[in-house]
Image (tube, rainbow, N blue to C red):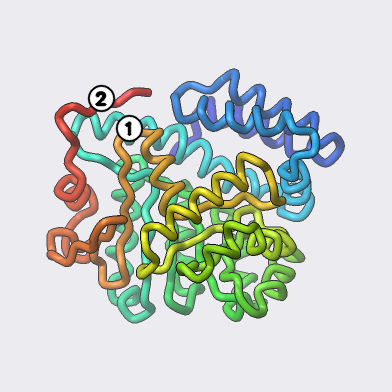
Amino acid sequence: MEKSTSRIIIETIVKKALRDIKDSPERSIRNLIDMALHFSGCRFQRNFFEVAQTMLQNEHSPYYGLIEDTVAHVDSERLLQFGMNLGYNSCTIGAKTIREMEEKEKYNIPWMISLNMEPQRFSAHQQRYRAVIAQGEGLGIYTWMLLPKSQPQDILSLVQEHPDSAFILFCKPEEITLSFLDCVSELNNLMLAIRYEEDAADACDLLRKAELLYSVYYRYTADDVESITSGDLFCSIEQLHPVFTILLADPECPETAREAVYEAVKQARSRQLFQTIAWEAACDSSFVDSIISNESCLAGFDSEGHLFTLQERNTEDCFNMFQTDLPRILKQAFPKSNTDEITA
């Protein structure tokens, strides 16, 4: 993606803001949000920055500490590129492309796609993964969740070859080795998500010392609802200094448990209870998509290449990324209703 004049201007402003935050965090953060709201164009941007502006009126908000800590401990070029890829390429330019494509082609396009990977299949289908990401970028999709079963270092080439996208790579604590970090340090469009379990603190400490951007994730079941709704889980995880605390529902988790967890996540954010941003992966991603293009559309592919949504897993070849191009899959899986109107 060739850098536009608007992106260059925004990058210049954000660079200055990152420098200013170190000296005067609260004022610099508020000024940046106010300016972003002033120049917001689409409905999604206005919604996001209005919420942020309201939240930061609380002078005791733990999000001030989160932003200050992140700026102090993450390499500024990494923050800039990942932030611009997510905020500008994905949620601004990409969102605009998605709305235009949906209006023209009459099918829904997700703003983000998750890719589950198994080492042997990834090795056999590397070109298909590259093609899917390239096709996705052509549709306006610039945010990708990568969930390898093991050997996350093998898929770093995908991140390197698509510098315009923002990638979240999910890893186990034991996979955070010095040799792995050497490879990751070259990729400024990547955020790591570390599984919350034994040794997670040691892994996060290594990432913090390496000035890398990271979050923590937890795969929850119905048995975890109490610890999440009480805030105990967030209290424990915020000690590891993650930007996001990402909650992934176990496939067998009942809908009632998911609803309770999502309500707790929304409460944690609106009441600004923790120095980490709570995020329920499926529900929040679906909500963002509904703001971008009215109809919610959530999509991912399992390690066998099959499309899955919140409702079902499609095993037909026509919904398999190893067999069919991404635009054709989305067109068949997510046709628009006749009454839908796309608004900016």
Residue 9, x across and y down, in percent: 60, 27
Left or right side of 44 for 207: right
Identify the residue at image location x=61%, y=76%. Answer: 197
Tell me the number on the disc at residue 294: 1
Examine the rendered structure and indicate whether residue 294 appears above or below residue 307.
Answer: above
Residue 293, x across and y down, in percent: 33, 33
Kind of residue indicated by mark 2 = Glu
> Which quadrant holds residue 205?
bottom right
Identify the residue at image location x=36%, y=76%. Answer: 118
Left or right side of 154 for 333: left
Badge 1 element: loop
Residue where numbered disc 2 is placed: 341
Examine the rendered structure and indicate whether residue 118 appears above or below residue 19.
Answer: below
Kind of residue indicated by mark 1 = Asn
Left or right side of 26 for 325: left
> Which quadrant holds residue 182?
bottom right
Left or right side of 196 for 24: right
Examine the rendered structure and indicate whether residue 277 appears above or below residue 170.
Answer: above
Residue 107, x across and y down, in percent: 20, 39
Crowding at dot 2, Cα within 10 Å, few <14 / some 14-19 / many 20+, comes out as few
Quadrant containing the C terminus in the rendered view: top left
Crowding at dot 1, Cα within 10 Å, few <14 / some 14-19 / many 20+, comes out as some
* Mark 1 vs 2, N-terminal side: 1
| Residue extending furthest toward the right | 23
* Disc 1 from disc 2: Cα separation: 8 Å
Report if the CB atoms under discs 1 and 2 are less than 8 Å apart: yes
Residue 250, x across and y down, in percent: 41, 68
